């Protein structure tokens, strides 16, 4: 009982910390309460094993089990006076990443234990003590729960190790995806035009500047005509980007580098004490883009030229379906004065904007480039088959999507998985992505 009371008290502290430091994340407290319930449920199973063990082992395993929750409480308390985005790289990234990994790994034995408990409950209800119990029934209701419990804890432990590898190793293994895009009215001079599509750096989560340096070298070897970045440069505040200025300035493209804002770039995840602080944060981000030579497109467009031909690159501010995301994207404003340009490419951070707005009202846009989803950073990929929990939240969550609008017209969407990470500072089965979009003339009649 004392653990339940203590845990609820810690969760209350976390709620008030989030409300003060990261107000938008305070909405996730009901989800954290569910995690807490499962944590206690799992502890009951552990305690049944520990109660007959010697005192030293009992204390050691009890301490280890509650490290994640205790660590969460400590981080929350310190955040009151010193927000996490002001911490050093190590303390900002690794403790939270390990805690997140521990809780995620704990969910595996929880699932197995829930099934085991269900079988035991059925057994209690179904046993007729006046009849002989069959060997099959003994196996199903006695042995199977034991095997399920053992399997759950083993799988959870293995998953935890993989999650740690995702932080230490896989987060820096970049995947280059080459995607040809055939457009009917593409001018001949743009055939083979190369666009590097980047997204979601989340620079506040990088634990190695060397990894970003490797990514920049890889981008430059692809010799792009332009580089585009589809938002979420930072997690919370513009200051997170400043230590990476010298690295990002090294990205080269023949016709420039263009970017847009993502939901995290507005400073909405921080509780500002006055509007002037939030405004100064945005100015700092705009100045950062100028310092690295990137062109920010905020509901505006640029013509890209080759020989005597041109295509349009438009960029909009963030627009997300969910209520907690800004809805500042204005495609009509971005295209104003350029409606007659035959080939249009749009940068829009959130793929729900394509689904709800672009695909319905702006079918003259040939290609939309988005990010935001990250593939939830954890999933499975085998050849063309892929799985992530992201697919239960987003219809378009990873890769290339093509839509037939008629015999002579197609519309395309590409969702980039992002180069960085958020919350979980790693990648597992959903590697960070650099996309090479190559425009092609459509040769079909």
Image (spheres, grey):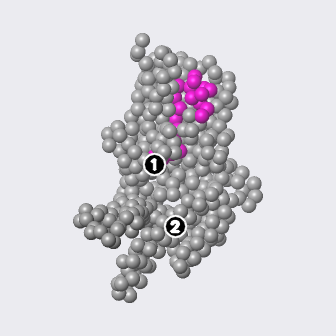
Indicate the quadrant where residue 271 lies.
Answer: bottom right
Between residue 393 and residue 398, name the one nearer to us: 393
Q: Look at discs 1 and 2 and give the one toward the viewer.
A: 2
Provide the residue span drawn in magenta.
356-375
Q: Is residue 434 left or right of residue 8?
A: left
Q: Is residue 85 magenta?
A: no
**Residue 414 higher or lower than 231, as above or below:** above
Q: How many marks?
A: 2
Task: Give whichever of discs 1 and 2 has the lower sequence position.
Answer: 2
At x 28%, y 64%, the residue is 137
Depth check: give the residue in front, 281 or 369: 369
Q: Which mark is residue 286?
A: none
The answer to whether mark 1 and mark 2 are in CB contact below 8 A is no
SS state under label 1: helix
Q: Give the numbered dot on residue 389.
A: 1
Q: CA distance from mark 1 to mark 2?
A: 21 Å
Q: Is disc 2 placed on a helix, strand or loop?
A: helix
Q: Which mark is residue 37?
A: 2
Measured as percent of width and height from the top left, residue 131 is found at 29, 69
Please say if 26 is above or below 344: below
């Amino acid at each position: 009982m004392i653990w339940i009371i203590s845990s609820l008290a810690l969760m209350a502290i976390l709620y008030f910390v989030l409300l003060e430091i990261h107000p938008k994340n305070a909405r996730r407290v009901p989800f954290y309460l569910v995690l807490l319930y499962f944590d206690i449920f799992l502890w009951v199973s552990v305690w049944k094993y520990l109660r007959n063990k010697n005192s030293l082992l009992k204390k050691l395993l009890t301490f280890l089990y509650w490290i994640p929750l205790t660590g969460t409480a400590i981080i929350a308390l310190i955040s009151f006076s010193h927000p996490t985005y002001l911490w050093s790289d190590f303390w900002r990234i690794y403790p939270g990443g390990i805690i997140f990994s521990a809780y995620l790994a704990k969910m595996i034995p929880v699932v197995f234990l829930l099934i085991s408990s269900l079988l035991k409950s059925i057994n209690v209800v179904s046993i007729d003590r006046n009849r002989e119990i069959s060997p099959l029934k003994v196996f199903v209701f006695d042995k199977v729960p034991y095997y399920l419990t053992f399997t759950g804890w083993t799988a959870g432990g293995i998953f935890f190790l993989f999650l740690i590898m995702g932080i230490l190793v896989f987060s820096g293994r970049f995947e280059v995806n080459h995607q040809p895009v055939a457009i009917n009215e593409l001018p001949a001079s743009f055939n083979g035009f190369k666009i590097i599509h980047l997204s979601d750096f989340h620079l506040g989560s990088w634990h190695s500047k060397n990894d970003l340096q490797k990514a920049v070298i890889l981008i430059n070897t692809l010799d792009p005509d332009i580089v585009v970045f589809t938002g979420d440069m930072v997690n919370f505040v513009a200051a997170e980007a400043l230590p990476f200025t010298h690295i990002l300035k090294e990205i080269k493209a023949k016709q420039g580098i263009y970017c847009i804002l993502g939901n995290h770039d507005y400073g909405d995840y921080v509780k500002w004490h006055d509007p002037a602080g939030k405004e100064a944060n945005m100015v700092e981000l705009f100045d950062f883009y100028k310092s690295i030579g990137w062109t920010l497109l905020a509901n505006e467009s640029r013509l890209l030229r080759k020989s005597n031909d041109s295509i349009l690159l438009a960029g909009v501010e963030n627009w997300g379906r969910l209520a907690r995301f800004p809805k500042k994207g204005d495609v009509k404003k971005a295209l104003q004065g350029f409606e007659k340009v035959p080939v249009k490419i749009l940068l829009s951070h959130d793929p729900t904007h394509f689904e709800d707005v672009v695909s319905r009202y702006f079918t003259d846009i040939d290609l939309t480039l988005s990010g935001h989803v990250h593939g939830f950073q954890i999933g499975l990929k085998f050849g063309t088959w892929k799985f992530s929990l992201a697919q239960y939240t987003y219809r378009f969550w990873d890769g290339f999507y093509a839509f037939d609008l008629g015999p002579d017209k197609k519309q395309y969407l590409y969702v980039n998985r992002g180069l960085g990470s958020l919350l979980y500072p790693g990648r597992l089965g959903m590697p960070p992505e650099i996309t090479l979009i190559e425009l092609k003339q459509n040769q079909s009649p």
